[in-house]
Amino acid sequence: MDSLKLPGLSDLDLVVVLQSSLRKAKKAHFRSDFLPTDFRYLIMHDPIMLSRSLFERIYELIPIFRLLHRSGEKMSPPTPTGESLSLIYHLILNDLAIVSLADKYSDLHQAKIINLRNTICRLNALNYPMRMFALLGRPMPQALDYEAKVKNFRKHFF
């Protein structure tokens, strides 16, 4: 397992690649609430379950900046470059900035009780779209300042 810089305020995304189709998989076997209690601060959500063919396109589906093999058959999805990479970043940015983040922040706004750990993770998650804009050659001037402030806040939280 990879190391966490800030256990409790960051998490690992677990990707499970299945031999068979996703429809045949028993998703209950891979739910995060079945993990030992010690792991629940390392993995905040259910694993990402992909078929082999979807795993080959993982960079088109999920903003992953570092993919580490931990168990089973080692697979290496092709790394997109050039125009393909630019298109993928634009698609993921659209999903992150317009759909996913807006939905998550709406949930935070409507919640009766705010989960502080989850909120701090969401603040950190805003760094990903900003990094992607920079990778596309459109850096946001305030991004480095924001990232430094969130990093400092998380580092001194406990």
Image: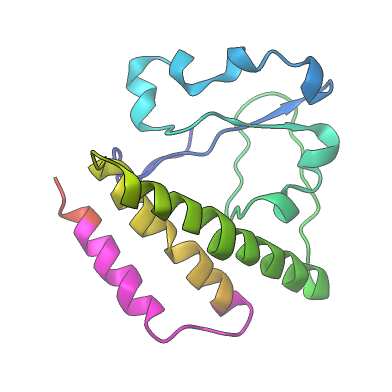
Q: Is residue 53 magenta?
A: no
Majority secondary structure of magenta residues: helix
For the image shown, how many numbered marks are present on the structure? 0
| Span colored in magenta | 134-153
Residue 11 visible within the image: yes
Q: Is residue 146 magenta?
A: yes
- Which residue corresponds to the image point at 28% horizontal and 62% vertical from the top-left? 151
- Which residue corresponds to the image point at 61% horizontal and 66% vertical from the top-left? 93
Q: Quadrant of the C terminus?
A: top left
Q: Quadrant of residue 88?
A: bottom right
Q: Is residue 11 above or below residue 87?
A: above
- Which residue corresponds to the image point at 76% horizontal and 58% vertical from the top-left? 79
Q: Quadrant of residue 44?
A: top left
Where is residue 138? Give x, y as percent.
57, 85
Q: Is residue 60 above or below residue 16?
A: below
Residue 5 visible within the image: no
- Which residue corresponds to the image point at 46% horizontal and 83% vertical from the top-left? 140
Colour mapping used in the image: rainbow
Where is residue 43? Give x, y as percent.
44, 32
Q: Quadrant of residue 155?
A: bottom left
Q: Is residue 82 above or below residue 33?
A: below
Asked whether 84 or 72 is in front, the reply is 84
Where is residue 31? Give x, y as percent.
54, 20
